[in-house]
Amino acid sequence: MSITIKNKEVLQSYILTTAKYDFSVYEKRILYRIIELNQNLLEGKKLNDRYQVNNTLFKSKEYVMPISAFLTTEDSKTDKNHSRIKKALKGLQQKIIEYEDDEAYRSAGIIFNVEINKTRADNVTFYVADFIYQTLMDFSKGYRKYELKVAMQFESIYAMRFYELFSSQKTPINYSIDRLKEMFGITDKYKETKDFIKYVIVSAKKELDKCSPYTFHYETMKTGRKITSIHFVPIYQPQFEDENIKKNNLNKQMSNRWFISKNIEEYLVHNFDFNERELNNNLNLFESIYKHFSEEETLDFLAEIREPSAYAENRKGFIIGALKKKVEKKFEELYLK
């Protein structure tokens, strides 16, 4: 099954990636489309005529898009009344996203006030509270980058979640079974660990193996005689990566600023108002950052200094100075031991 969609890389907040929720596949597709539109706005891109995101007077955003944005070609043939999408829209009005770390607990409903206009090519309109919008765009805890088309075409919600978790993940990672069940909103399901592994982990892995640029190998870990955690090893499958995305990434590397990633550039421009001249004036610094730190490390650092920089007399000077100190410290660790 396939969805008619222009593929692109989507940046998703790590807060959402590891949040606690149990969505259906169709509910997740709606959420993917919301994230896609948010990113288009962040990048300053003009939306297709059938898509709109409008500010309201009530601390919310209005989204308008065609129902076809969530459907596979098979859905279009078998569900003429769009009952699955209506059910998903209703479900998203009743469900909340929860996120908790050492600093805070957050929860909120996803959408509200849904309307399907049958006289306008089945356009759907709904609203998202600013709190949810800000959460979806909050990269302070990191992010995951994945191909939108791949994510939208999965038939299992667990394949979607594991794809998000392991996209661009380069190092092994451990998750307790309790933590995974909390994240997936299934603490009351699969009482037997063997069933959880079979119906959640193994089934998701089979789907990822078939079509995803990222999948995983897993091993069970025991506390005493009981399986309590899973050790995951990310696996990159380049044969499933979009060729156009590969080509675009290569073209970016060949430009005179190839060592400033698009995501870092956008973060500097949108959060700190850097312009072309200011970025070009610090090319040597950004090249050093590229050589010594991953994109995720740099974005995490920028997120850490975002708030203190707001109190600086010269905010951009503060940012550049902090980045230089970070590079100098790394240089000392590597070469001045």
Image (cartoon, rainbow, N blue to C red):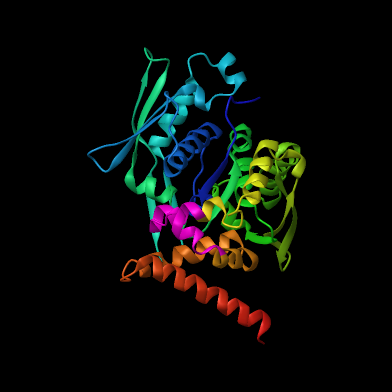
Residue 160: where, in percent of width, then height?
60, 41
Closer to us: 176 or 100: 100
Residue 126: where, in percent of width, then height?
36, 31
Q: Residue at x 49, y 35 (%)?
A: 33
Q: Residue at x 33, y 71 (%)?
A: 312
Q: Does residue 71 appear left or right of residue 276 in this picture? A: right
Q: Does residue 218 appear left or right of residue 94 in this picture? A: right
Asked whether residue 291 is in view, the answer is yes
Q: Residue at x 37, y 37 (%)?
A: 111
Closer to us: 42 or 88: 42
Q: Does residue 22 appear left or right of residue 120 in this picture? A: right
Residue 291: where, in percent of width, then height?
65, 66
> In which quadrant will I find the N terminus?
top right
Q: Residue at x 58, y 20 (%)?
A: 75
> In which quadrant will I find the C terminus?
bottom right
Residue 289: where, in percent of width, then height?
58, 66
Q: How many marks?
A: 0
Give the overall secondary structure of the magenta segment.
helix
Magenta extent: 265-283
Closer to us: 104 or 326: 326
Q: Does residue 167 appear left or right of residue 82 in this picture? A: right
Asked whether residue 99 is in view, the answer is no
Q: In the current view of this chain or complex, which residue is farthest to the bottom? A: 337
Is 269 part of what is drawn in magenta?
yes
Is 13 part of what is drawn in magenta?
no
